[in-house]
Amino acid sequence: MKKSNLTSNDIAKYLGVSQSMVSRAFNPKASISEQKRTFILEGAAKLGYKPNALARSLISNRSGLIAIALDSSSNPMYDLQARILASEVQRQGGHAILCPISNGDLDSAIQRAFEYQVDGLIVATSRLTSNIIEQCERYGVYLSFINRYIDDFKANSIGLDNSDAGKQVAEYFFEKGCSSLSFIGSEKGSMTCEERWSSFCQRAMELGLSEPVRISASFDIDSGMLAANQLVNDTNKIDAVFCANDIIAIGVIEGLKIHHHSGIRIIGVDDIPMASWPSYQLSTIKPPTDVICKSTVEDLFERISGSEEETGKYIFYKGTLVERSS
């Protein structure tokens, strides 16, 4: 047999099994014993056979492609999410297409993915337009969100329990004897940021503290450094700051260093690798990123395979407060 012309039927005849069993052996999610799977995969490898993904997609009317849209920003959290999501998509038998969003242009990034007839789209960014939602509905593309929720839409969102994160930080500051709090995050409009601010503010006031001072900042180090200027000059003598993410918090630390200002406790969110660096030792809310990403992919594949009515859910996972010297 010529290797280039081999089909699953050829492999089945050669190994003495059914064609359907050969197909199941190459499907990570199919029901087949590991012994049989290994036998078929090893036999197929010796013969030089590889399944034809294009032919399979034509038969099933599914490409197996999953687009992942995420910000191409300097936040390492997006890189970590991309790696975990892509690995999990592959484990589920699919193929990931990364769609980095440049200059905030989500529409262009997603449009390129639609050209490959993707089965699903995972949006791991706060940016989302009505145009994207309409296109997903028009083309039958299944949609999942990470840390973002939209009412009355056929999609699920899986992410960090932002309300619990805000409460944890407020209680931690209170237990440490802090009395004048501040929150640094994006301007109103970001669901993630609003939930963290709202719960942080509410819990602080429930504990008898004054309403925290809110300072607007973009999700980058430079904005954190600018926010540090406001902290230093604020008449409330702020002694504790909750930052919407670790990148802002690191910027605040750098800014306070410039002013030779100390005595302010700082907590971020994400537990990115830089948070544990000796120069920062940033306390932070650590989300279960592995669990969130794997659950997102599993949920998406379940809906693609037929459970499309299971939508409109926001699935929360609580974070853990990692205490460091900041």
Image (cartoon, rainbow, N blue to C red):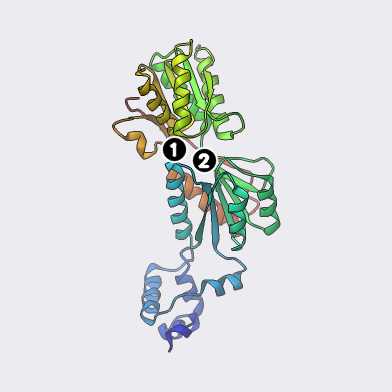
Q: Is residue 147 above or below residue 154?
A: above
Q: Is residue 6 above or below residue 187?
A: below
**Closer to the N terminus: mark 1 or mark 2?**
2
Q: Quadrant of the N terminus?
A: bottom left
Callouts 1 and 2 close, C-beta under 8 Å: yes
How far across and down, in percent of the image, does residue 183 sit?
50, 23
**Does 314 sit left or right of 254 as displayed?**
right
> Label 2 sits on what residue type?
Gly
Relative to 23, say whether 144 is above or below: above
> 14 or 267: nearer the eye?
267
- Residue 190, position as x, y percentages in the image: 58, 34
Label 1: state its secondary structure. loop
- Residue closer to the observer: 275 or 11: 275
Residue placed at 56% from the left, 75% from the top? Answer: 55
Q: Residue at x 63, y 56 (%)?
A: 141
Position of residue 85 measured from the top left corner of the image (x, y, whole percent): 47, 52
- Where residue 238 sits: x, y (%)? 45, 15
- Neighbourhood count class around disc 1 (C-alpha, 10 Å): few under 14, some 14–19, many 20 upward: many
Q: Which mark is residue 287?
A: 1
Mark 2: give few (<14), some (14-19) or many (20+) Cα within 10 Å.
Answer: many
Residue 254 picture quarter:
top left
Q: Which numbered disc covers residue 159?
A: 2
Q: For the residues marked 1 and 2, what is the alpha-carbon distance in whole angstroms?
A: 8 Å
Label 2: which secondary element: strand
Left or right: where 249 falls relative to 101: left
Residue drawn at x 50%, y 83% is 9
Q: Nearer the viewer, residue 286 or 229?
A: 229
Tell which of 287 and 117 is nearer to you. Answer: 117
Which residue type does callout 1 highlight?
Pro
What residue do we see at 39% from left, 36% from top? 271
Vertical placement of residue 176 versus 101, above or below: above
